[in-house]
Amino acid sequence: MDKELSFDDAMKELETIVQKLEQGDVPLEAALDQFQEGIKLSRYCKSIVEDAEKTVIKMIKENGSEEILED
C-alpha cells in the first residue's frame, strides 16, 4: 500500500474491496489477498483519523473551544 495515499483514496479502495468480497465470486486465494489489503487500508485510515483527532484536541487545549468555533 502506498503511504502517500490520501484518506479519501484509501477509503475508495477499501469500499471497492468490500464490494468485490460481498459479491462472493472471488477465488479464495484472491479473496484472502484482498481481505489482507483491506485490513491494511482500514488500519491506515484509522491512523489518519486518530492523528486528526489528536490535532483537534491539541488545538482545543491550546486555544480554547470558543476561539476555534469563531473561525
Image (tube, rainbow, N blue to C red):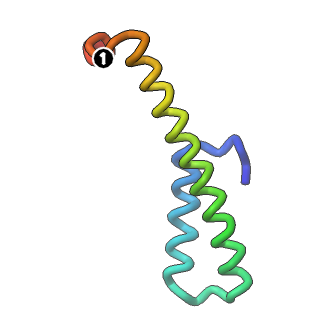
Q: Crowdedness of circle 1 by 10 Å Cα count: few (<14), some, many (20+)?
A: few
Residue depicted at x 60% and y 53%: 43
Local SS, label 1: helix
Compared across the picture, whether 59 is left or right of 29 comes to left
Compared across the picture, whether 4 is left or right of 9 comes to right
Position of 7 relative to 26 (above/below) = above
How far from the left and from the top, in percent, is residue 1?
Answer: 73, 54
Quadrant hosting residue 30: bottom right
Residue depicted at x 56% and y 48%: 45
Q: Which residue is mark 1?
A: 65
Position of 33 relative to 23 (above/below) = above
How far from the left and from the top, in percent, is residue 71?
Answer: 30, 13
Position of 18 relative to 1 (above/below) = below
Residue most extreme to the front: 61
Q: Label 1 amino acid?
A: Ser
Compared across the picture, whether 3 is left or right of 53 comes to right
